[in-house]
């Protein structure tokens, strides 16, 4: 357990604080260690890239940060809350409130308009429909997609679909944006446009964490974390 004297709190400007985080998976009669001894602090407004070869642990780390998986050991504080102490329902509520996800394959509903896709994270929030629409329109405007808000994904270019996906990640005003290979299916010019949007989000106070294999794109981040064999080797 993290020493309370060193535990990050919102007042410290830290959004994420990890100490000695580990993750293990059963494989046959043995165990595979995906993460071991991970220590990581991330401040609000950070734009961070996570890099490493396949099997280095970066996806596992991303899933733990995003509350899609849990660690087996160590401490993880998100906005000053010890995640390990939460029930599944509490974790889901914290994830919905705090984390926004951007995926390489966009993960948009093909028959829903851009506006409806962006509204999805607000489905389980106890707010009026009119407010959901207003927040979705605001998020789409923020990424320059207001004129296309009634178009369906198949009517949009790859860059436009990723802008819609970013708007969906933003709509609930999360503190953290997790972007998993966000430019992987885009050409280089469009990819730079998406990176520019992510940088702007970080400058506005969001914590943006991006997994990427592209060293050129990673250079646009303020900080690069490199992983190898389940450990952070450069921070």
Image: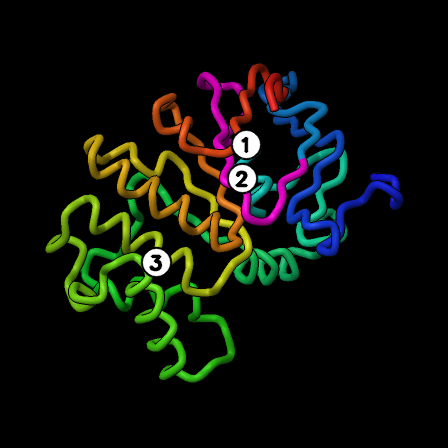
> CB under 8 Å between callouts 1 and 2?
yes
Which residue lies most toward the front here? Answer: 203
Circle 1 Cα neighbour tier, 10 Å, few/some/many (<14 / 14–19 / ≥20): many
Q: Is residue 136 above or below residue 45?
A: below
Q: Residue 81: horizontal and vertical position, in percent? A: 73, 54
> CB under 8 Å between callouts 1 and 3?
no
Residue tagged 1:
60
Q: Residue at x 53, y 37 (%)?
A: 62
Residue 206 is left or right of residue 78, and the answer is: left
Question: Closer to the camera, 205 or 9?
Answer: 205
Quadrant for the N terminus in the image = top right
Residue stretch in magenta: 41-60
Residue tagged 2:
63
Residue 102 is left or right of residue 83, and the answer is: left
Please tell me in which quadrant of the rendered image residue 187 appears.
top left
Q: Is residue 198 above or below residue 140?
A: above
Residue 57 shown in magenta:
yes
Alpha carbons under labels 1 and 3: distance apart: 25 Å
| Closer to viewer: mark 1 or mark 3 | 3
Alpha carbons under labels 2 and 3: distance apart: 20 Å
Q: Residue at x 42, y 41 (%)?
A: 179
Q: Is residue 194 above or below residue 138?
A: above
Circle 3 Cα neighbour tier, 10 Å, few/some/many (<14 / 14–19 / ≥20): many
Q: How is the image coloured?
A: rainbow
Residue tagged 3:
167
Q: Residue 182: horizontal and vertical position, in percent? A: 34, 39
């Amino acid at each position: 357990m993290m020493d309370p004297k060193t535990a990050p709190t919102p007042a410290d400007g830290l959004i994420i604080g990890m100490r000695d985080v580990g993750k293990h998976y059963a494989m046959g009669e043995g165990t595979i260690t995906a993460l071991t001894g991970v220590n990581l602090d991330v401040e609000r407004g950070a734009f961070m890239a996570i890099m490493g070869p396949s099997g280095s642990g970066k996806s596992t780390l991303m899933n733990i940060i995003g509350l899609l998986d849990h660690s087996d050991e160590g401490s993880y504080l998100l906005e000053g809350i010890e995640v390990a102490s939460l029930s599944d329902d509490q974790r889901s509520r914290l994830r919905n409130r705090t984390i926004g996800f951007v995926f390489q394959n966009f993960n948009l509903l093909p028959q829903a308009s851009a506006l409806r896709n962006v509204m999805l994270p607000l489905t389980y929030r106890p707010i009026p429909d009119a407010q959901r629409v207003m927040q979705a329109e605001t998020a789409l405007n923020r990424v320059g997609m207001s004129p296309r808000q009634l178009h369906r994904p198949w009517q949009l270019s790859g860059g436009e679909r990723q802008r819609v996906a970013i708007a969906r990640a933003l709509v609930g005003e999360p503190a953290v944006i997790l972007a998993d290979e966000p430019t992987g299916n885009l050409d280089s010019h469009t990819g730079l446009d998406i990176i520019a949007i992510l940088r702007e989000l970080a400058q506005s106070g969001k914590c943006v964490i991006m997994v990427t294999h592209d060293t050129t794109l990673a250079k646009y981040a303020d900080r690069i974390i490199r992983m190898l064999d389940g450990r952070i080797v450069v921070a």
